[in-house]
Amino acid sequence: MVDGEPTRRRGTSILVISIIIVATLGILRSIPQVYTVPELDVRVAIIDSGINVDSELATRVIAERSFINTSYGYQRTDNTTYDSAPNGNLHGTYIAKIIAEESPDAGIVNAKVVANDDSATMVGVAEAIRWTVLEENCSVINLSLGMDHIANDIVGDAVKWAFNRGVCIVAAAGNEGDDGISGSSIDSPASYDEVIAVAGVDDQLVPYGFSGRGPLRDRVLKPDISAWGYYNENGGIAFGTSFAAPIISAAAAKIIAHCFQNSWQWTPGMIKAALMVSAIHLPFEEWEVGAGFIDFQSALIYIDNAKKVNNLPLIAALNPDDGPFSFEYWFVNHSVSVPISIFSSSNVTFNLEYRGVNSEWIHGPTEVTINQTGQITLELEVIASDDVENVDAWVIFIAPNYLNMRTSFNFDAIVPYKEIAIDTSHSSWVIDSIYGQFRELTQRINKLGISVDDFGPGSEITLDLLNQYDAVFVMDPCTWSYVFVNDSVTKNSIYPYTQSEIDAYVEYWKQGGGLFLVGLTNNSLDLSSANALFSAFNMTLNYDAVPPISILVNGIASTTLITKMHDHPVTRFLDSFDYNGCSMNYSGDAFELAWTEIFMLDENGTIHQNNVTVVAGLENSNGGRLLATGSNFFLDNWALNGKYQSLQNWRLVLQALFWLLQILNP
């Protein structure tokens, strides 16, 4: 593939189609039907794998162009506009059929960007967006594709540019939901505020396991709305959020046509807000299904009855509308940052009123001005010396000519038994957070009455900060960051530790703090930068891999089962745990806790056996304790949900935590 390396869950950046095919879709209709000539008042761009134009689509497709060209970074040029059928499956054709069926008068613009190997380039997609807007005057863009999040994302820039020019952009939420186990799993460009991110539900209105879930790394809520996550054709069925997105795109086109018919103005912010406020509430959380299931007729009612200023219906929406999420535990004397996303028809200023019995514990601005989309952050902190039950407060958003909006908070806040932090401040991966691949870890620790705070990107690591916590887990330090340079995606090291940060960690440990340093292989981390931290404690991560070869089975990486452990409170009573990472070296007062055998084949065909360290520890006379490892696999969501080999990963994590907190002693 052109743009990157394998497997999204560890932070790489390949652009791929968001599609899951479960059954063969059969042969397309052999007996052509007669279709009326539509008016084609609104143009919808399908940026996808191309379209096979049959009798149904012949009167609908009004412009076509392929962007699969070596000048845009593809390995070969393909000037055809018919469906490239990635991996043998039609895709863009089905997207076009959904839009044609759902919005009978929408004109379709075919921008082909996905090659038959299921890949596209960022340049190709960005150029397609610009072409559909500048040359084809499209009002709606459908992106049933997704990619990992990277720095200086030119597709994201193109999406924002199109939105600012008045184009409604709809994208599939992605198919990496993994029944919610993966945590944050919304693809880009669906993750952008300017985009309507669409989740997929089944015919019982239950979210599909594959459907991408939120929230994002910074707790920003996605997806935005839900629609059917499948497509039927001649007895076959295809599944994926790819097929939910065009339902929303078609609805957007019909809303625009409705505004034209009534001589009303419209904006992409108005369309997003109207679809969200009119959605049917589902018995699931917003981070799973967004505002709910699309209800087009209700959206029209909202638009018809909205106050009109300069012929523009004024509608607004926000998310989340309540909190906390079901997996969250909030503690007294701990501040929680809650981003609120706001969408509106126009440039508008909202006044905020803080109400409820406990409104004094919510802090935020008194007003906010947005231009169709924007965010504020509310800070919630319950100040108390004892547990507080049924905290009740809400914030009302008020603007002239708009209906009032409200977000509410109702929860119990407890006094933490211990306080720890998870530091992902030096990781570029969107999955690295207490909302991502460490969600299960956070939730299980919270259930013990232990608070968990998140040091995210931009956090300043100081001794004063660290001293607020009994232990700190440092996860995936110095990940490679994927950036767009010279028309391709490359990895750079942009997250090294400063010497002052390393000094703060060393001093924290010397004063009696608990540290857990969690690394990975050089494919994932810049080990030279990560080892600047590890070596401060007489340990280093090696440039190897354990296991030497890792494969994916059903999207889950294979692991080595670690069974060789020294007798220690961290490893006692354990039979095994999972490992996928690198080995370690240690010296001085550091000590080995677990090791494994690896077998290597040299250039002469001789097999060599080596014992390598995978977990090490360190203590000092002031009570400081440290653990270090070259793998995060026994701490992630998959491990703690029993998706690898061992069922004892949580026991290892729990004993490690209790040892760091000095609850377990020799």
Image: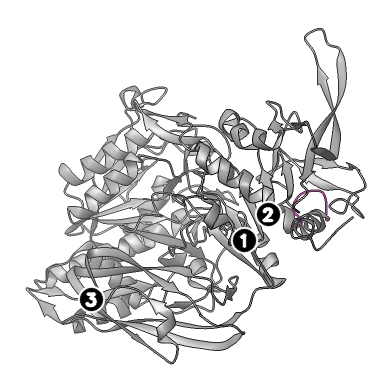
Magenta residues (range): 642-647
Expressed as whole percent of the image width and height from the top left, the position of residue 362 reads 41, 79
- Residue assigned mark 2: 513
- Residue at coordinates 72% horizontally, 42% vertically from top-left? 628
In the rendered structure, which disc, 2 or 1, sits on the residue that comes first in sequence? 1
Residue 332 appears in the picture as rendered: yes
Question: Which mark sits nearer the N-terminus, 1 or 3?
Answer: 3
Compare marks 2 and 3 and give the one earlier in the sequence: 3
Give the side of residue 514 with respect to residue 83, left or right: right
Left of 191 or right of it: where is 478? right
Residue 349, quarter of the rendered image: bottom left
Q: Horizontal placement of 92 versus 316: left or right?
A: right
**Callout 3: 10 Å neighbours few (<14), some, many (20+)?**
some
Residue 291 in the image: state x and y as whole percent.
42, 73
Q: Of helix, strand and loop, which one carries label 1?
A: loop
Apparent side of residue 250 relative to residue 138 in the rendered image (left or right): right
Secondary structure found at label 3:
strand
Q: CA distance from mark 1 to mark 3?
A: 37 Å
* Residue position for label 3: 350
Kind of residue at disc 1: Tyr
Q: Nearer the viewer, mark 2 or mark 3?
A: 2
Other-residue count near label 1 (Cα within 10 Å), few / some / many at <14 / 14–19 / ≥20: some
Give yes or no for contact between labels 2 and 1 (Cβ–Cβ under 8 Å): yes
Q: Quadrant of residue 290?
A: bottom left
Q: Main secondary structure of the magenta part?
A: loop
How far across and down, in percent of the image, does residue 436 sit?
57, 56
Q: Which mark is residue 89?
A: none
Q: Which residue is mark 1?
A: 469
**Quarter of the C terminus within the rendering:** bottom right
Q: Residue at the spot x=75%, y=28% of the render?
A: 548
